[in-house]
Amino acid sequence: MNPLQMLGALQKARNPMDLLKQLSANNPQLKRVIEVMDGKSPQELKAYVQNVAKTQGIDLNNLAQKMGLQLPQ
């Protein structure tokens, strides 16, 4: 499943976290991401993503724009 297909499936899923857990069974990287996300508030997740992006030199607004997404403020 490519990333765009995954995003589409997540949007349609009743419980996106359950779908991610199923998909992670064969993907150790995705499994680690889910472990990091589990139990975090939206604010904690936002801070985590911003910190990771910053350490990798990624401009989240630019990335979102390229993907046709708008980041919440």
Image (spheres, grey):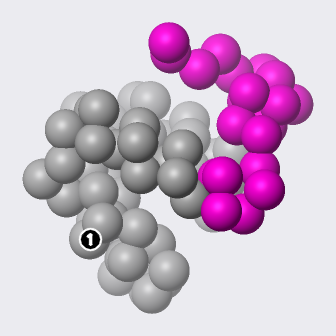
Tell me if residue 39 comes above or below residue 46 in the rendering. Answer: below
**Which residue range is magenta in the image?**
53-73
Tell me, yes or no, if residue 63 can be seen here: yes
Q: Nearer the viewer, residue 73 or 31?
A: 73
- What secondary structure is found at the residue carrying circle 1? helix
At a point 78% along the width and 56% down the height, the residue shown is: 57
Residue at the disc numbered 1:
35
Determine the residue positioned at 64% across, 53% down. Answer: 53
Q: Is residue 3 left or right of residue 59?
A: left
Q: Is residue 46 above or below residue 1?
A: above
Q: Nearer the viewer, residue 58 or 63?
A: 58
Please, which residue is most extreme toward the left here? 39
Quarter residue 47 falls in: top left
Q: Position of residue 10 (x, y in %)?
A: 43, 40
* 30 shown above or below 72: below
Residue 10, compared with residue 2, is above or below; it is above
Figure quadrant of the N terminus: bottom right
Q: Is residue 30 or residue 8 the one in the foreground?
A: 30
Q: Position of residue 15 (x, y in %)?
A: 22, 40
Count of labels in the image: 1
Give the image quarter of residue 65.
top right
Task: Name the residue located 52 percent from the left edge and 52 percent from the top edge.
Answer: 51
Which of 29 and 19 lies nearest the eye of the viewer? 29
Inspect the magenta stretch and tell me whether residue 62 lies in it: yes
Residue 23 appears anywhere in the view:
no
Residue 11, given in percent of the width and then of the height, sits at 44, 30
Q: Residue at x 83, y 31 (%)?
A: 62
In screen coordinates, is 45 left or right of 11? left
Q: Is 31 a magenta residue?
A: no
Q: Residues within 10 Å of mark 1 (few under 14, many from 20)?
A: few
Please name the amino acid that badge 1 sits on.
Answer: Glu
